[in-house]
Image (cartoon, rainbow, N blue to C red):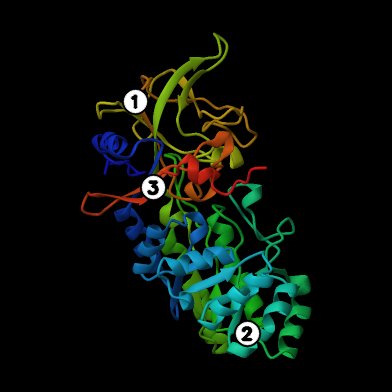
Amino acid sequence: MYPDKAGLIEPSTIVELARQFGTPLYVYDERTIRAKCREILAMPHAFGLHASFAMKANSSRVILQIVASEGFGIDASSLNEARRAERAGVAPERIMLTTQDVPLGEDRKELERLMGKGMGYNVCSMRQLELVADCAKRNRSSLSMRVNPGVGTGETATRNTGDKYSSFGIHLANLDGVLAYAREHGVSIGTVHTHIGSGGDPEVWRENIDRVLSITERYFPEATLVNLGGGFKEARMPDETPADILDLGRSAKSRFAELAARTGRELRMAVEPGTFIVANAGHVVASVLDIKSSGPDGFDFLVLDAGMETCTRPLLYGSRHPFYVVSKHGRLLSSEFAPATLQEDECVVAGRCCESGDSLTLDEHGKIVPRKMANPEAGDFVVVGGAGAYCSSMTLVGYNSYCQAAEVLLREDGSFFLIRARQTLEQLTQNECSL
């Protein structure tokens, strides 16, 4: 690995990956994924820690298999995610389904099958409880319940999942009625769950510990597990600071211990990170297709074969990802983690889609923000770092009929393993019907 904060793969390896698998290409580092899993599992706790991987961050089968082999469960956000986790070899009893969906028809049968095999279900609304209560009672399942605590945080407003602007979970104002229904129908709530946002202020996450424990003490006398969610801030860029997992764990441990000393309830703690596990383990390797300018008062553009259809986060959120420029001969030309390599000139990184927003250098208002980097030639490579989370799983594949990029795992022994073949045009169009 290249010795910088974001762990760039060796430049010579970038060239070899592009030669073997083509570009654009997602590359994941197995060593980093496993190290991040172990960092979470070392989080201090009072009476036990259960960790799950938020698979919406990256749902590729091999990624799920790696995190499961490290002792993680799976946090699924849809019934299909739960199905995919099971197909990856994860036992249903290690899967928790937390979804906005209300499975009906054939999906209802599948939900009951998975719950019958031990899959957890996180109730997020009264309607969900009404539809699942009989199945839970029949299987003697202890349900989880997601509570909207009225406070949230996120890297952007659209990633705040815990206040009045969020539809996730059951708001405190409605909790009494929902719990009354659960009691009337003999349903036990064994887990209390909150998730207040992704990539937000760690201090707000810390403050939420007391809030959730207070809610648990007041409303959930049968609960034995408190799920504090995920959303731990990760540092993709040189000027960013990640959440201090050990410090957050120490805060949680002390709060759980205080509750136990006062009430006798020794509650176990659960967390469900996604970004923190895989973000900096992933890179997009892209080829420079063209170099253009919009005039003396405009910008210099690097046109890549990977843009918004490969990494949507800049367009959606104004998110920043680090750029590395690697020559076709395997030499690192610039890295944002090595300021001395950067040029005085600034470039805009654009994709190949017919869309003005197809740029990887946008701010939160959708405005172009040029970045300093080396001036490459056509055929050189731009590597987009921090692309392990919410990139391959959140693509705009199909726009302009561009196909899904291949994915490769860099094994701990240095070998390459293809974990998703490049999509073909035939696969992209196989479900279309003709007149």
Give SS at disc 2.
helix
* Residue occupying image coordinates x 35% and y 56%: 33
List the residue tagged with mark 3.
421
> Nearer the observer, disc 3 or disc 2?
3
Badge 3 density bin: few <14, some 14–19, many ≥20, Cα 10 Å: few
Mark 3 → mark 2, Cα distance in angstroms: 39 Å
Which residue is at a point 35% across and 24% down the rendered structure image? 379
Residue 136 — which label?
Answer: 2
Q: Are discs 3 and 1 less than 8 Å apart at CB? A: no
Above or below for 225 versus 304: below
Looking at the rendering, in which quadrant would you find the N terminus?
Answer: top left
Which residue is pictured at 58% across the width and 74% down the height?
A: 110
The residue to which callout 1 is attached is 380
Query: Which amino acid type is marked by label 1?
Result: Asp
For marks 3 and 1, the one nearer the N-term is 1
Q: Residue at x 51, y 29 (%)?
A: 351
Horizontal and vertical percent position of residue 299: 53, 17
**In which image quadrant can residue 23 be found?**
top left
Left or right: 42 as drawn, with respect to 205: left
Residue type beneath disc 2 = Ala
Label 1 vs 2, first from the N-terminus: 2
Q: Position of residue 205 (x, y in %)?
A: 56, 61
